[in-house]
């Protein structure tokens, strides 16, 4: 009995020590994903097989901020219920290095639970290189390539099946797709694609990562910069606009806005919850909800 008591004391001490070590690591270790060539240090994706019949793959990076916890959880709900039979789509949330102690702990929990976060090696910003860091880092940190890479804002609602349908017949190379600016333009070869959400083919992402043109031009409106990089490098011969199926929420941005339409690909500038609710109700997002005696709506 004496030996058993000693064993239990040692066992309990080991458990306490293990818990202490775990919390010490979470509290003190910086949470970041450095851009190293070694696969062991790269951002890890779930290795679930693509659905049978998948024709292409798309990674959507939603650029957001570390403290936007509620928005990320909401978007997870919005995007996880959309069925995509012909494409493999992954949605990741993207922001710069985290320095806040509280955010480190909460983000560590999110990463453990959802594995849908990319933390870039940069200081949080809007027009000082974050988009460049996002695109230029992906060929290094991703364990695989995607046919398309998308950059999206966290105030845009993307109807993934519509987006996939619009991309399905398009080229997989040298492609630049989105909502062309200025607002009145329908010519994707003039102007540039709005930062609400634009798509680049993988070869263009690799070019951004290796070219000196974007590397030396990273300060300014991020969406305008991307268009300028591609023009300077004589890239993106295949350009397509999602208009009028991509637009700003009604009444928010002049000629870039119009009423909600059934064939919508993306609605931008959803800053308030009442706007989100209006959009979700318009597209009848909950129509597939099964009847159940467990809830009474």
Image (cartoon, grey):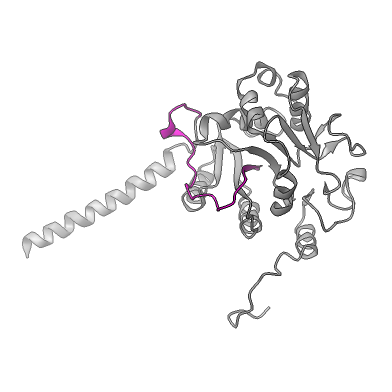
Residue farthest to the left, as pictured: 2
Q: Is residue 36 magenta?
A: yes
Q: Position of residue 91 (x, y in %)?
A: 61, 47
Q: Position of residue 105 (x, y in %)?
A: 48, 47
Q: Quadrant of residue 61?
A: top right
Q: Position of residue 275 (x, y in %)?
A: 79, 58
Q: Left of 214 or right of it: where is 117?
A: left
Q: Compared with residue 228, is residue 9 higher up or lower down, i.e. above or below?
A: below
Q: Is residue 132 magenta?
A: no
Would residue 258 be seen by someone viewing this image from the given angle?
yes
Residue at 64% across, 51% down: 86
Would residue 155 be seen by someone viewing this image from the given angle?
no
Give whichever of 203, 52 is nearer the camera.
52
Q: Quadrant of residue 120?
A: top right
Q: Quadrant of the N terminus?
A: bottom left
Q: Position of residue 290 (x, y in %)?
A: 63, 75
| Magenta segment main secondary structure | loop
Give whichever of 254, 14 is nearer the camera.
254
Q: Left of 278 or right of it: where is 79?
A: left
Q: Which residues are magenta?
A: 35-64
Q: Left of 210 or right of it: where is 236?
A: right
């Amino acid at each position: 009995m004496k030996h058993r008591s000693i064993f239990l004391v040692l066992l309990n001490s080991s458990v306490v020590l293990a818990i202490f070590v775990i919390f010490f690591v979470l509290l003190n270790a910086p949470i970041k994903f450095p851009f190293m060539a070694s696969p062991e240090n790269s951002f890890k994706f779930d290795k679930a097989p693509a659905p049978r019949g998948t024709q292409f793959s798309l990674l959507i990076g939603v650029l957001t901020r570390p403290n936007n916890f509620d928005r990320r959880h909401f978007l997870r709900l919005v995007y996880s219920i959309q069925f995509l039979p012909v494409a493999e789509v992954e949605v990741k949330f993207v922001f710069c290095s985290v320095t806040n102690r509280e955010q480190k702990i909460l983000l560590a929990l999110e990463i453990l639970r959802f594995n849908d976060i990319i933390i870039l090696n940069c200081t949080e910003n809007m027009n000082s290189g974050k988009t460049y860091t996002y695109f230029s880092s992906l060929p290094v940190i991703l364990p695989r390539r995607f046919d398309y890479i998308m950059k999206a804002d966290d105030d845009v609602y993307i109807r993934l099946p519509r987006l996939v349908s619009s991309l399905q017949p398009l080229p997989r190379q040298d492609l630049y797709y989105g909502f062309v600016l200025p607002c009145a333009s329908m010519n994707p070869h003039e102007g540039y694609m709005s930062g609400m959400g634009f798509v680049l083919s993988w070869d263009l992402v690799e070019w951004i990562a290796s070219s000196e043109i974007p590397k030396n031009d990273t300060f300014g409106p991020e969406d305008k910069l991307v268009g300028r990089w591609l023009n300077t490098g004589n890239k993106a011969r295949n350009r397509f606009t999602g208009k009028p199926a991509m637009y700003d929420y009604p009444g928010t941005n002049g000629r870039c806005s119009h009423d909600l339409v059934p064939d919508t690909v993306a609605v931008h500038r959803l800053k308030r919850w009442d706007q989100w609710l209006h959009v979700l109700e318009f597209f009848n997002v909950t129509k597939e909800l099964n009847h159940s005696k467990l809830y009474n709506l």
